[in-house]
Amino acid sequence: MKWILIICLMFSYMCFGQQMLTDKTFSDSQEGVTVVEFWANWNSANECVWLESIEDAEVYRIDLDTDAAKENKITVLPTVIVFDDGEEVERYEGDISFSLCPDKTPKKVQKEINELILDKF
């Protein structure tokens, strides 16, 4: 039984590589380049699992039912926002099927992050 629990915990850790934020931790996490996915449990089939492959930025997930989602005027799910020191730089919103293109969007997000980092030099 112990091994089943360990395997389940490891599997859940691998599946949920993004750190969940709350309203309190959202404001604390805004240093440097960060990527935040706004999502809802009912839309979990369209979560942006490709965000785990993003490099050189902190990647987080925050629920739609938060003040942070309201302050950022989230109206479409999923929504991925790239922040630089707490300022919104770029926003990617899901389409009518509540998804972001997994072929094009990761490249666009990574390109934006790379440009932000290069601009700091």
Image (tube, helix red, strand yellow):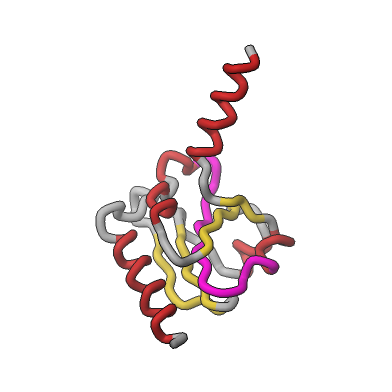
Q: Residue at x 37, y 74 (%)?
A: 114
For residue 15: magenta? no
Looking at the picture, how far across and down is residue 17, in whole percent? 51, 46
Q: Nearer the viewer, residue 100 or 87?
A: 87
Q: Residue at x 52, y 67 (%)?
A: 34
Q: Is residue 108 left or right of residue 32?
A: left
Looking at the picture, how far across and down is residue 16, in whole percent? 52, 42
Residue furthest out toward the right = 24
Looking at the picture, how far across and down is residue 10, in whole percent? 55, 31
For residue 37: magenta? yes
Q: Residue at x 55, y 38 (%)?
A: 13
The answer to whether 56 is drawn above or below residue 77 in the figure is below
Residue furthest out toward the left = 103
Quadrant in which the N terminus appears: top right
**Which residues are the magenta region?**
28-42
Quadrant in which the C terminus appears: bottom left
Q: Nearer the viewer, residue 110 or 104?
A: 110
Q: Residue at x 41, y 72 (%)?
A: 113
Looking at the picture, how far across and down is residue 106, in whole percent? 33, 59
The answer to whether 15 is drawn above or below residue 59 in the figure is above
